[in-house]
Amino acid sequence: MRILIIALPRTGSKVFTKWLSTELGYKEYVEPNRMENIEGIEGDNVVVKWDSWEMDPIVAEGDWDKVILLSRENTYDQSISLVRARERGDTWWVGSQYTITREWIKRNGIEIGLRKEYLDNEREKLNRYNGIPITYEGIYHTGEHRETLRTELGIPSWKYLDIIGMDKRYRKDIKLI
């Protein structure tokens, strides 16, 4: 099976891709447009993750058995995460946990608002693709979309849910001080 994940930023897409490829025993390709060796991307038994804003519509309409559209319901929270990631520059993905304060939100309010507007527009564009719509919340919080995927992909049961545990999250819950 060939699976394409088109994901918005700050949706846990890298971890999600790793988890899904591990569950299926498939090769994973994260952001192949940034990779040098992508020979296997055309083969079978692959999970390919592509950022929504860099998605080539020709690739999206390609020879995929399943297309998964990963977004976030709470784009305000997502925009906070995106502003924080941009603030950290090239080290945003390093994996160290952090906490957001009320002061930080106030100091970055304008940028957060602009990013939220951008993310709302990107989510609207993402939903124009044909695919299985899932959300960060439905994967990592409620589990509702894990069941959707299990059914859609014909998987009897999950074996590696620990990969997507909330304890692996970069940002701790917001504690407004």
Image (tube, rainbow, N blue to C red):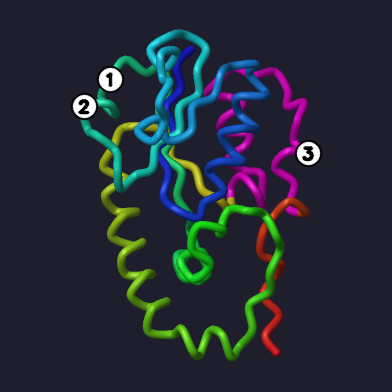
In percent of width and height, residue 117 lies at: 32, 70
- Which residue corresponds to mark 2? 58
In percent of width and height, residue 75 lies at: 45, 65
- Which residue corresponds to mark 3? 162
Give the CA distance from mark 1 to mark 3. 32 Å
Say what amino acid the circle numbered 2 marks. Ile
Say what amino acid the circle numbered 1 marks. Gly
- Of the numbered discs 1 and 3, the one sitting upstream in the chain is 1
Say what amino acid the circle numbered 3 marks. Asp
Q: Residue furthest left?
A: 58
Give the CA distance from mark 1 to mark 2. 6 Å
Residue 57 appears in which quarter of the rendering? Answer: top left
- Which residue corresponds to mark 1? 62
Looking at the rendering, the stretch of residues picked out in magenta corresponds to 138-166
Q: Residue at x 55, y 59 (%)?
A: 92
Give the CA distance from mark 2 to mark 3. 34 Å
- Of the numbered discs 2 and 3, the one sitting upstream in the chain is 2
Relative placement, left or right, of 166 versus 67 is: right
Q: Is residue 163 magenta?
A: yes
**Residue nearest the viewer, comparing 124 with 114:** 114
**What is the crowding at mark 1: few (fewer than 14 residues within 10 Å), some, or many (at least 20)?**
few
Establish if 160 lies above or below 143: above
Local secondary structure at mark 2: helix
Q: Residue at x 51, y 48 (%)?
A: 135
Local secondary structure at mark 3: helix
**Residue nearest the viewer, comparing 31 with 60:** 31
Q: Residue at x 45, y 50 (%)?
A: 71
